[in-house]
């Protein structure tokens, strides 16, 4: 592996658009891909952004852009062969992962690896790796492909339980089932909201956790690095606020890092991984760590690192995948993020209240410039720092609340 990545920096990097340019093909051009694009361009890389719709956030800043159904393997292959990228960087779940595996076998470089992309974009693959191969602690679970199998799984797991499609993002298709009356509706929602051609769901036992964290883990040429834990609050399966650092017992932090290193070592490759963990117990007592999920790319809750750390998760990801050293990750101040959501659907969203929002001390705004919105679509994020996590969270929430998405 070290030889492959070292080759990424073996030759001089040409200027974008000219001979010898280093080219990054970004498969998925949302708000996280936009920040990856900016960081790659800062290091002199040429970026080609791809998404299923025009004018996606990363497309607006990349050197070139393509609109493409990324689940169509033949279209993905044609684009790779035409653009000839040095790095293929998946940034969303809905991608023809079998095509990426084949391309990697032919010599193309997929970040972090095609295996990692395929496993983590399918909850069945990553859960079986974590629980059955690596023996990491997880919630009890079963998979189902028919209504009958699903009903049997719910009966075995018991209520309450969580139901999710095996392929989805941002909480789409996820339900907490508390009563028998909710069972069939949760199946319908999960089955209809799943991404790609996956027609299976996972039924998970509900864990009475006290804290849910993201441990950003970086595998790079100079070692494995961990960012301070990020706490976050979810609603309807999607994050609403995140904060860093998240208070944990020192022994719990060590266990979180052990779990994160074990799963990321198994996935391989270099880059930043968002490892999601459930923590049961208070910080001043013994805590239990449960593995939940992992993303082989920057994480939405990690947007807080744009103000909290000396290097954001996006800079860390780009450094790692391009074969550059990480050095030392430092927390600058307690910080938080809060999302800006759309109140409904529009093909021409507009924004107001930015001046009022930025009157909040130590606050920043990132509006994503998405060309369309729907109910509760994430359209921006407010970032803030403070002398404590509580102060930072209050500032971020206040800043986000001032921004109006006009339909």
Image (tube, grey):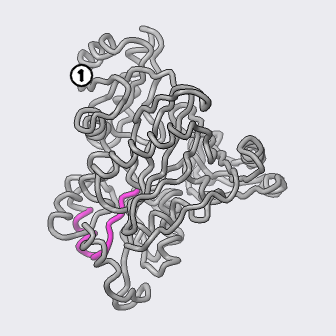
**As drawn, is 115 to the left or to the right of 356?**
left
Image quadrant for the N terminus?
A: bottom left
Q: Nearer the viewer, residue 28 or 160?
A: 160
Q: Is residue 80 above or below residue 132?
A: below
User: Which x, y percent locates residue 7?
Assistant: 28, 78
Q: Which residues are magenta?
A: 76-91
Residue in view at x 40 percent, y 46 percent? 260
**As drawn, is 42 to the left or to the right of 361?**
left
State the residue position of label 1: 146
Q: Nearer the viewer, residue 282 or 397?
A: 282
Write down the quadrant of residue 104 in the picture: bottom left
Q: Is residue 79 magenta?
A: yes
Q: Is residue 275 above or below residue 348?
A: above
User: Which x, y percent locates residue 291?
Assistant: 40, 35
Write down the quadrant of residue 232 in the picture: top right
Answer whether residue 340 is visible to the viewer in this image: no
Q: Nearer the viewer, residue 194 or 278?
A: 278
Residue in view at x 45 percent, y 58 percent? 225
User: Which x, y percent locates residue 216?
Assistant: 48, 51
**As drawn, is 18 to the left or to the right of 311?**
left
Answer whether residue 275 is visible to the viewer in this image: yes
User: Which x, y percent locates residue 85?
Assistant: 31, 74
Residue in view at x 45 percent, y 60 percent? 29
Instruction: Classify mark 1: residues with Cα within 10 Å, few (<14), some (14-19) or many (20+).
Output: some
Q: Secondary structure at mark 1?
A: loop
Q: Nearer the viewer, residue 301 or 80?
A: 301
Residue in view at x 23 percent, y 73 percent? 81
Q: How many marks?
A: 1
Q: Is residue 254 magenta?
A: no
């Amino acid at each position: 592996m070290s030889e492959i990545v070292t080759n990424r920096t073996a030759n001089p990097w040409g200027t974008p658009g000219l001979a010898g340019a280093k080219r990054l093909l970004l498969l998925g051009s949302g708000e996280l891909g936009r920040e990856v694009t900016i960081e790659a361009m800062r290091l002199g890389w040429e970026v080609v952004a791809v998404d299923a719709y025009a004018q996606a956030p990363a497309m607006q800043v990349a050197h070139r852009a393509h609109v493409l159904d990324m689940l169509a393997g033949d279209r993905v292959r044609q684009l790779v062969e035409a653009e000839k990228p040095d790095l293929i960087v998946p940034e969303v779940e809905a991608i023809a992962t079998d095509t990426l595996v084949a391309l990697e076998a032919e010599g193309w470089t997929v970040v972090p690896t095609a295996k990692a992309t395929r496993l983590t974009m399918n909850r069945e693959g990553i859960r079986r790796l974590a629980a059955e191969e690596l023996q990491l602690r997880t919630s009890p679970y079963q998979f189902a492909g028919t209504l009958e199998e699903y009903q049997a799984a719910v009966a075995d797991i018991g209520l309450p339980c969580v139901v999710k499609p095996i392929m989805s993002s941002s909480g789409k298709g996820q339900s907490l089932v508390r009563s028998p009356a909710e069972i069939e509706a949760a199946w319908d929602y999960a089955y209809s909201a799943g991404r790609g051609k996956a027609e299976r769901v996972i039924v998970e036992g509900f864990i009475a956790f006290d804290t849910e964290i993201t441990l950003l883990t970086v595998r790079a040429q100079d070692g494995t690095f961990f960012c301070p834990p990020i706490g976050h609050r979810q609603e309807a399966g999607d994050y609403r606020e995140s904060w860093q650092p998240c208070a944990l017992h020192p022994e719990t932090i060590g266990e979180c890092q052990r779990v994160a290193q074990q799963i990321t070592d198994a996935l391989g490759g270099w880059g930043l991984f968002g490892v999601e963990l459930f923590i049961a117990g208070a910080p001043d007592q013994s805590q239990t760590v449960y593995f939940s999920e992992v993303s082989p790319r920057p994480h939405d809750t990690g947007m807080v690192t744009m103000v909290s750390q000396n290097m954001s998760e996006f800079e860390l990801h780009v450094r790692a995948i391009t074969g550059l050293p990480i050095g030392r990750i430092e927390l600058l101040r307690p910080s938080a993020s809060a999302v800006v959501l759309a109140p409904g659907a529009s093909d021409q969203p507009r924004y107001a209240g930015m001046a009022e929002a930025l009157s909040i001390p130590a606050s920043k705004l990132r509006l994503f410039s998405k060309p369309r919105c729907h109910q509760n679509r994430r359209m921006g994020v407010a970032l803030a720092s403070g002398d404590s996590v509580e102060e930072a969270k209050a500032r971020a929430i206040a800043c986000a609340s001032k921004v109006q998405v006009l339909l």
